[in-house]
Amino acid sequence: MCSYFNHREVKPNWRLIENQEFERMNNDFDVTNLVSLDFKNFPSMFKSLLENTDFKKLNIRGWQKDGVIPYTESLIWQSLERELRLEKLQHDGDDHDNVAPPLNEETLHARMQNQTSSQVIVNGNTRVNVPKATTNHRNTLAKAYNTVAQDETLSPRVEQILADQTASVNDLKTILYLVHAQHVALTDAVHGFIRDEASIARGSDVYNLPGGINGVAGRNRIVLGLTNAKQRQDEKISARETKQAKLENEIKDATEFLASIREKLTTKQAVSGLRIADLNKVYLAVFGKRPRQGSHKSELIEQVSSKLFEKDEVGDIVPPSAHSLPHATLTEDDTTA
């Protein structure tokens, strides 16, 4: 696993090995005839680097500093802390003493609220980014959905007015029915769209969830993406099988149709007398596939005829007459023998 901290230590070692290899190849140091390194030198150079570097120790230390193992998200905390300090400096001018305090868990979650504005909660507790679009569109759609979905006072108010039988609210009932229906339709449609369109999770989908990829929210998001991918794959397979079954049924019907008229199709002229629909059936029976979309009738006639009568054409070939073959002539050697 690559680490920023590992790179800072490995790269100088690589440069040292690179210089040593270059010096070995150019012992005479003839400036006019220097030999450059190429890909053929790399295997031995990599071997030397692996033999002289404790990558296990480097990885363990790098993972700790990166916040991967143990999972502390230290780089995210450090980045957000720098952002807060920079914003504080920009807000207060050049007062370097008046800087933002170090981040804690509460300020971190508060800070990340803006980064989750394009997410919608589905299936009860799974956060999903609004599917691909511009950032502004994603944020706008998510905000509209969350505003409507989280308005817990709308339904009780509507139900209360609808239950009132006084004449003063009867005129409002039609409108309220419509508003309530739109509210339900919007939340259901957007919720279903975002849930069903959630793709396989990437780092950008889970990095700002509580606990990251190892948290409950991250695992739920991963499971949702994999479930959707499996469902889409199953749908493709089902559609392919349905399409193939339909084609096989059409071929069966076309084969039966061709068998019923095969005795009449003795010449190309008889084939040309078929209707275009019947000609398509014959083509399907003969070739086992549908004709190319947009094919002209003349093309179908030529293709079907060549396939139907190819055996007859071979049988009609007459071998050359024996009289037409060249006669053997005797040479002088043959006559003397």
Image (cartoon, rainbow, N blue to C red):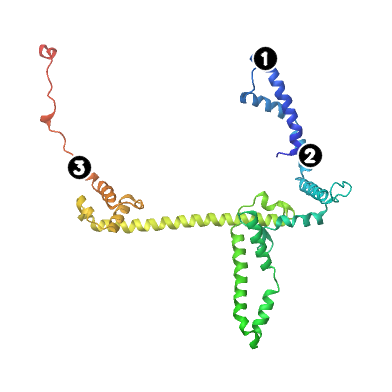
Residue at horizontal 67 percent and vertical 75 percent from the top? 155
Q: Which residue is mark 2?
A: 61
Mark 3 vs mark 1: give the one in front.
Answer: 1
**Mark 1 and 2 residues: CB-CB less than 8 Å, in contact?**
no
Identified at 43% across, 56% down, the residue is: 243
Q: Amino acid at mark 1?
A: Val
Q: Relative to residue 311, is residue 332 drawn left or right?
A: left
Relative side of 310 to 86, left or right: left
Could you give the CA–CA distance between mark 3 and mark 2, rounded to whole angstroms?
83 Å
Image quarter hosting the C terminus: top left
Q: Between disc 3 and disc 2, whose residue precedes?
A: 2
Give the amino acid at mark 3.
Answer: Gly
Task: From the viewer's perspective, tell me whether residue 102 is left or right of residue 181.
Answer: right
- Residue 175, x across and y down, in percent: 61, 78
Q: Which residue is mark 3?
A: 315
The quadrant where residue 53 appears = top right
Q: Residues within 10 Å of mark 2 (few under 14, many from 20)?
A: some
* Residue 327 appears left or right of 279: left
The kind of residue tagged 2 is Arg
Say which mark, if any, is on residue 31: 1
Disc 2 element: helix
- Residue 39, position as x, y percentages in the image: 62, 26
Q: Between label 3 and label 2, give the one nearer the viewer.
A: 2
Q: Of marks 3 and 1, which one's residue comes earlier in the chain?
A: 1
Which corner quadrant of the image does residue 178 belong to? bottom right
From mark 1 to mark 2, how far is it between C-alphas?
42 Å
**Mark-to-mark CA distance, 3 and 1:** 81 Å
> Which SS class for mark 1?
helix
